[in-house]
Amino acid sequence: MLPKWLPLDEIKEIFSKHIKYADTDKMRSGMYLREYTVLTELT
């Protein structure tokens, strides 16, 4: 993997899918929810 800067709207779209992982990958779902929550508070 390589670090890459993305537009905030694109990042919010990626992390907004935290519900998709709720039943299959709780760790990813929690991480996505955490990041999405922070992004929505900042913007």
Image (cartoon, rainbow, N blue to C red):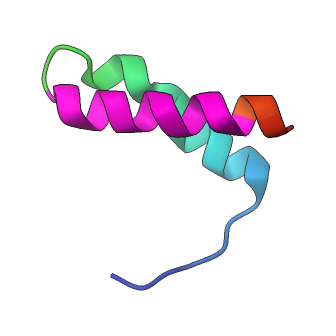
Location of residue 3 in the rendering, given as x and y in whole percent from the top left corner: 49, 81
Query: Is residue 8 shown in magenta?
Result: no
| Residue at the bottom extreme of this rendering | 2
Residue at the spot 27% in from the left edge and 25% down from the top edge: 21
Tell me which residue sits at (76%, 60%) in the image.
Answer: 7
> Does 9 sit left or right of 10 as displayed?
right
Query: In x, y percent, where is residue 22?
Result: 26, 17
Q: Quadrant of residue 28?
A: top left
Q: How many marks?
A: 0
Between residue 5 and residue 39, name the one nearer to us: 39
Q: Position of residue 26 (x, y in %)?
A: 19, 25
Q: Is residue 42 above or below residue 37?
A: below
When the figure is inspected, residue 37 is found, relative to residue 12, above or below; the finding is above
* Residue 40, position as x, y percentages in the image: 74, 30
The magenta stretch spans which residues? 25-39
> Of 38 and 14, which appears nearest the observer?
38
Q: Is residue 14 left or right of residue 39?
A: left
Residue 35, located in which quarter of the rendered image?
top right
The answer to which of 1 and 36 lies nearer the viewer is: 36
Residue 16 lies left or right of residue 7; in this view the side is left
Work out which quarter of the rendered image holds the C terminus and state it.
top right
Residue appearing at x 49%, y 33% in the figure: 34
Main secondary structure along the magenta-highlighted residues: helix
- Would residue 11 be found to the left or right of residue 2 on screen? right
Residue farthest left in this picture: 24
The quarter of the rendered structure image containing the N terminus is: bottom left
